[in-house]
Image: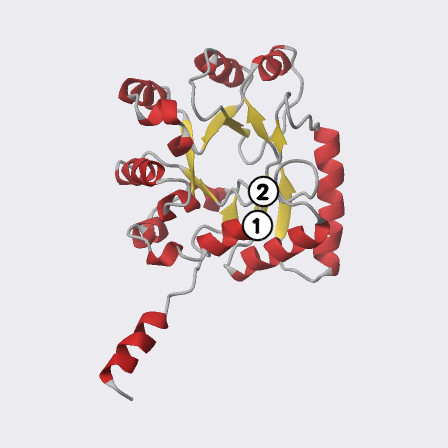
Amino acid sequence: MGIFDFFKKKEQVKEPLDLSWMQVDMHSHLIPGIDDGSKSMEESIRLIKQLADFGLRKLITTPHIMSEFFRNTPEIIHMGLEDLKREVASEGIAMEIEAAAEYFMDEVLLEKVEAGEPLLTFGDQYILVETGFVNKPQMLFEVLFQLEMAGYKPILAHPERYQYLIFNKELLKDLIDRNILFQVNLLSFTGFYSREVKEFAEMLLKKGLIKFLGTDCHNDRYLEVLGTLPQTKYYRQLQEANWKNTDL
C-alpha cells in the first residue's frame, strides 16, 4: 500500500454520531401526515429507527400548531401519537415516545392562553413556541408573559434561525434577562441552514445560553446531515455540557 493510499483510507474513517449524552430529543416532526414533517408511517419508523441507533432513549415529537397552515389540535396529535406508538412497538424499536407541540406565537395562541384552553406541554410545564424567521412578532413579549402567567415555561424553538434576533443584540439581551429558555437545533452547528445561523448558534453555546437541544427532524435529509455533527468544531463541547433534555 502506497503512502497516498494510507492517507486516503485514513480520511474515510469518520466518527459515528452518538447522541446518548442527550438522551431525549424534545423537538421533532415524526407523527406522519399532520404537518411538514414525516409524510408516512413508513418514513416515521425509518427515522425513529435511525434516532434509536444514534443512542436516544426518548422522543418528544412536536407537530406544528399554526393557525394559517397546520390547524392541529391536541386530539389530532394524540390520535396520531397512539398510531405511531403502536407501530413502533410492533417493530420492536426500543424508544419511548411522547408528543407535545410547537406553537406559533400569534393572536390565535394568545386567545387560547387567555381563554384558559389547555395546551400541550412536556416535562415541568414546558411549552415549545416559535415565531416567523424574518420579522420580530409585535406581540412576542405579550405572548411569553401570558404563557408564564398561566403557569407555562416557554421554550423558544431554534432562536439561532431568527434573522430579527441574530442582528438585534438588545432584543437578545431582553430575552435573556426575562430568563426565556432557548432550544437550539443540532443541525445549526453543521451549517445546514446557513453560515450566519451556525455562527449565532456557536455564540449561544459559548456563552452558555442554550438549555435544550433538538434534532427538529422532519425527514431523511435532516438525519443524513446530522450524521456529520461529530466532524464539527463544537461536538465535544455539546457532549460535555449539561442539558435539560436529560431531565425529561
Decide if residue 176 is on the left or right side of residue 66.
Answer: left
What crowding class fits label 1: few (fewer than 14 Cα within 10 Å), some (14-19), or many (20 or more)? many
| Residue 153 vs residue 187, the one in the foreground | 187
How many marks overall? 2
Secondary structure at numbered mark 1: strand
**Along the viewing direction, whichever of 108 and 5 lies nearer the viewer:** 5
Q: Quadrant of residue 37?
A: top right
What residue do we see at 33% from left, 18% from top? 171
Report the amino acid beneath label 2.
Answer: Ile
Q: Amino acid at mark 1?
A: Lys
On screen, 172 above or below 1? above
Circle 2 packing at 10 Å, graded few (<14), some (14-19), many (20+), is many
Question: Residue 45: which quarter of the image?
Answer: bottom right
Quarter in which the N terminus is drawn: bottom left
The Cα–Cα distance between marks 1 and 2, rounded to whole angstroms, is 7 Å
Residue 69 image point, x, y percent:
64, 26
* Residue 50 left/right relative to 165: right
Q: Which mark is residue 177?
A: none
Q: Is residue 219 above or below residue 166?
A: below
Q: How is the image coloured?
A: secondary structure
Q: Where does the image place residue 149, in percent across and percent down from the top left?
A: 51, 14
Q: Residue beneath label 1, please?
A: 58
Eyeballing the image, is 58 above or below 35? below
Q: Which residue ends up furthest to the bottom in the rendered image?
A: 1
Residue extending farthest left: 3
Which residue was labeled with disc 2?
60
At 63% from the left and 29% from the top, the residue drawn is 120
Image coordinates of residue 38 in percent, x first then y, are: 64, 45
- x, y (%) of residue 231? 34, 58
- Which element is circle 2 on? strand
Determine contact: label 1, label 2, CB under 8 Å: yes
